[in-house]
Image (cartoon, rainbow, N blue to C red):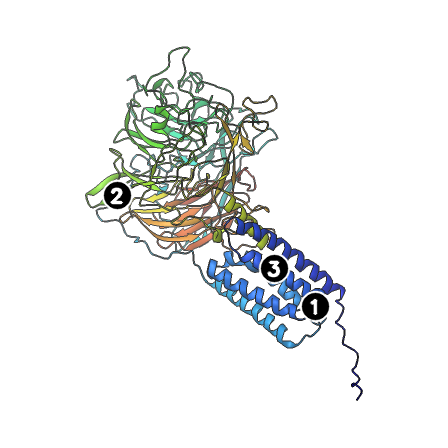
Amino acid sequence: MAPAQRGPMPTAKRPSLVVLMTAIVVVLIGLCLAAGGGWLIALGGSPYYICTGIALILTGILLFRARAAALWVYTVILLGTLLWAIWEAGVDFWPLVPRGDVLVLIGIWLLTPWVSRRLYGGSLAPRMALLGTLILSFAVLGASLARSPHDKDGTLAMTNAPAGGTEPLASQPKGDWQAYGGSGFGDRYAPLDQITPANVGRLKVAWTFRTGDMRGPNDPVETTMEVTPIKANHMVYLCSPHQIVFALDAGTGTLKWKFDPHVQDSPAFQHLTCRGVSYHETKPGAVTASGQPAPQDCPRRIFLGTNTGGLYALNADTGAPCESFGTHGRVDLNVNMPYAEPGFYEVTSPPVAAEKILIVGGSVIDNWSTKEPSGVIRGYDVYTGALVWAWDAGNPNHNEIPKEGQTYTPASPNSWSVSSADEKLGLVYVPLGEPDPDEWGGDRSAQQEQFDSSLVALEIATGKLRWMFQNVHHDLWDMDFPSQPSLVDVNTAQGMVPAVYIPAKTGNIFVLDRRDGKLIVPAPEKPVPQGAAPGDHLSPTQPFSELSFRPRAPLDGAMMWGTTPFDQLACRIEFHRLRYQGPFTPPSTQGTLVYPGNLGMFEWGGVAVDPVRQIIVANPMSVPFVSTLIPRGRKNPSIPPASMKPGQEEGTQPMFGTPFGVTLNAFMSPIGVPCMQPPWGFIAGLDLKTNKIVWQHPVGTTRDSSPLPVAMRIGMPMLGGPMVTAGGVAFLTSTADYFIRAFDVGSGRQLWEDRLPAGGQSTPMTYSEGGRQFVVTADGGHGSFGTKLGDYIIAYALPQGK
């Protein structure tokens, strides 16, 4: 019997050009993820990427063959990615986005008629499965938008503290802001209550002043407007990046006078910054430090330090130099200073103007060499400019003043930030950095080690050391005390205690009795990673305050971020390549992940303290850095070539005089976003009666950091600090987006915001004039922070007559 005749075999569809191109793209994506995923597995990372890459290659092969099974495979990829993302990151919007954004877009494309209807063997089933998985993905993403997993909700008591907190403002009118931190206590608090949570939303611009001082072609990248203005004598006083001083009418913002010290342009400057000026008013019957009657040529004085080591005293009424001070109103801070090259010693922060003594520190060039200026702290007669005392951390005889031809100790720990003073106790509290260079310390002297990254309490009258507290032992991470100490009397079990709260870059806030430096909040020593670079050494332990914003858990691969799976994968690979064993992992030639990063969880903005309600408002941030030691060689010579100029903080920092140079960079993805998932910045409220963080919320949006001007709250890095008022409102600029914001101190809830014309990397202040409370912010941007530069001083107030 003859076999039955069969019809012709069906032939597979040839893929259309659209399907073919889609297949090529899917295969290429799969190859990238598989190759990178294999590298990641070899480093001990997640197997997800190689598995997904292989599955994508299979999907592409099926697309080449125009088989609808490609949709089934892709559904498995998408569903597996969703489950993996939730397992790693939870239902948290920003960590979820890069894990699935590209894959979701590809899934949507595969469902279009140009692809799905061109596939052989297709039915509704694979398309419906893929559609359902996409809907589920969007549902999870929508649910994540409705959640705030990084918000900590709570309420601070807005009544006065038991036994009454104290306001350290008796020495100045209630409506003034006479020092950088509001008062010499560095509290950034004003006892003004015209602006409240109920009416802050009605704030409007009252006046705007433009300094006209902008970054020039010969200025460094680190040209910044970090100034906090002060208010006294019915005027607002401030300085611009080139240390030009302006005096404005406090009610109208009209220019009254200005003083230009003519600081020359120089790319050798590492910073071009002026954080503020200081104010001093002569009291009746005042005498100089030597006991002579105080001169009367300048009954009210403004003090200014400059990038070139100049210290000026100006008549606060007219702006004219005070002839009784130094030489025609100027003191040369380069006297007895070793290595006095321009830009090596810069006064970037305002001095402390006590009743008789003006206390001055300065910034020393970072990581250039071991031959750098001294970090000496000096006390000058506030009236005559005569040097009264010196305190040199690098000299065994701390108070020795060099004789003619001698110098202060090179590269001793310096104080580049702002100090605070308690004149009743007769003490000034000075935050210190580490000896230069920062990242290698094998040759540091015992004296340098003793005061490395410490807070020292010096007698205002004599400069003698009363006590000290060390924040980091043998600091190799630039984890110094960057913030002005905040002085506040706190209620404890032992009664009211005069305390100092000092934030550190590590995220620790150390709380000390400001009379003797004894800890109020425990800070036990804990073991830290070991294994220093050749020739260096490490401390086996470091102090960890029990009041801290430091990360509670170390970083891991799941916390790596990006905008797509590709740069997230690159960040994961780099994370596993770096040396990282948690806080205080030492610098290495391998490359060390520094977390919290060198920028610090706290910077020069400090914290704001309501001393009456016993509350702190803080704005911690966290962006990891990578520190890589570079041995001497062709790319890092032992002697600076003629073409190499000091000043820049980018690229390899040479650290001449040591066996290594160093590169320091934020830990960023290949396309320039942080490798650690957000949030990166918060605003938080602390109860000083319990030393607990009561509320905490991410602050800052993507408005000025993304290709599209979309303002999504993410929690941005910040430079600057908060300010609080008796009205129960806190103000903050600082963030990488250009806004001033107001918050309810009790809950941290945002009450109001206004758009700024440039970056607001400064700390706002407030004062009262003519019956109106003004809030003032300086908005000029920050060169290395990457925000828009400008020259704006903006004052807000409630509308008059309403």
Tell me which label, 1 or 3, sits earlier in the chain.
3
At label 3, counting other C-alpha atoms closer than 10 Å, the crowd grade (few under 14, some 14-19, many 20 or more) is many
Report the side of 431 relative to 518 (left or right).
right
Report the side of 428 relative to 162 (left or right).
right
Amino acid type at image mark 2: Val
Give the vertical position of 307 relative to 566 (above or below): above
| Residues marked 2 and 3 touching at CB (< 8 Å) | no
Q: Which mark is residue 490?
A: 2
Q: Residue furthest left?
A: 494
Q: Residue at x 57, y 72 (%)?
A: 132
Real-space CA distance between mark 2 and mark 3, rounded to the nearest whole angstrom: 61 Å
Real-space CA distance between mark 1 and mark 2, rounded to the nearest whole angstrom: 69 Å
| Mark 2 or 3, closer to the camera | 3
> Which x, y percent locates residue 607?
38, 42
| Residues marked 1 and 3 touching at CB (< 8 Å) | no
- Label 1: element kind: helix
Give the vertical position of 192 relative to 660 (above or below): below
At label 1, counting other C-alpha atoms closer than 10 Å, the crowd grade (few under 14, some 14-19, many 20 or more) is many
| Residues marked 1 and 2 touching at CB (< 8 Å) | no
Tell me which label, 2 or 3, sits earlier in the chain.
3
Q: Which mark is residue 54?
A: 3
Real-space CA distance between mark 1 and mark 3, rounded to the nearest whole angstrom: 21 Å
Judge by depth and name the residue closer to the eye, 130 or 769: 130
Amino acid type at image mark 1: Val
Q: Which mark is residue 115?
A: 1
Give the vertical position of 73 relative to 545 (above or below): below
> Which x, y percent locates residue 345?
47, 24
Amino acid type at image mark 3: Ile
Q: Residue furthest bottom?
A: 1
Judge by depth and name the residue closer to the eye, 497 or 95: 95
Judge by depth and name the residue closer to the eye, 789 or 405: 405
